[in-house]
Image (tube, grey):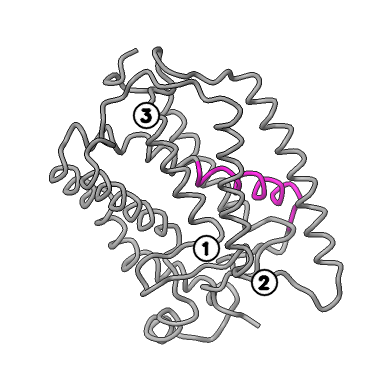
Amino acid sequence: MQLTNRLHFMDNLRGIIIVMVILLHTSLCYMAYAPEWWYVLDPDRSLLFTCIVLLLDVFIMPAMFFISGYFTFSSLRRKGTSLFIRDKVWRIALPWVMGVFLMVPPLAYMIYFSRSIPLPYLDFLTGDFLGKAYQQAHYWFLGVLLGFIIVVTVISKLFPALLKKPDNGKVPGLFFHTGFIVLTTLFFLGADQFFSLDAWIHPGYVFVFQPVRIAGLFVWFLLGIYCEQNRWFTDTGYNPKELPWTLVSLTFGILYLAWKLTLIRNLRSQPGLRIKPKQSSCDLN
């Protein structure tokens, strides 16, 4: 397979991830340990939906940024910088801005409406939405993705050698995989010293993101670029074996789920202690 040929499994993967995103956000309404800041919470809860949320939340966004990174440099090489930027403005920046201004305010108001909080929509829009209730809902992904793309585009202009055509590359070994895990873990633990896991920030009301995850997501985005540069998933490059990676993923998924459920139950059982809600959502108490 030539790199210029379309990688149809990437399209399939992206479609599956999008379905999982819908499943994740739907399940949040029904999970047994639902976050207090979610838009609508059903009184009927299920541990099944809690497990769905906990598992999907781990890999969905890293996968999305990885896929985006994989096609960034190939698109940049093919279109050139000017056309590439114009394309991203139409396909990412415009939907992002329109979504934040038109779609997000009524969605954010659902937090109040679903809980019968007596605040008219116009008062919410001119008051709380510009303060404690500000968010970009699901459109935060487009803003952060655009930021990542701008960063790597600038770097590629400063260092043109990085924008090389893909070669056969090297088969990644244990050191590569271990190093990647260690790097993302260090970023996560470092940010975790200053921010809670569910904390969201919005510097200057422009980008909205979770501080404990943003560095790791950028590393996943860079991994996508690296993999494309080394022809991963093509006939002339590295193709991971499905069975070993599937078994590893299932094993660690089960262990993670068991640990997470135990942790949540222990936190919930301690009197006077509750899990801190997302900072960018309104405090309903």
Mark 3 lies on a secondary structure that is helix
From which residue to which does the magenta span run?
Answer: 45-62
- Front in this rendered view, residue 155 or 18: 155
Q: Amino acid at mark 3?
A: Glu
Residue assigned mark 1:
211
Going from N to C along the chain, the mark reached first, 3 or 2, is: 3
Q: Residues within 10 Å of mark 3 (few under 14, many from 20)?
A: many
Nearest-to-viewer mark from 1 and 2: 1
| Residue 94 coordinates in the image, percent (x, y) | 24, 56
Going from N to C along the chain, the mark reached first, 1 or 2, is: 1
Residue assigned mark 3:
228
Residue assigned mark 2:
276
Mark 1 lies on a secondary structure that is helix
Q: Residues within 10 Å of mark 1 (few under 14, many from 20)?
A: many
Q: Which mark is residue 145?
A: none
Mark-to-mark CA distance, 3 and 1? 27 Å
| Residue 172 coordinates in the image, percent (x, y) | 52, 25
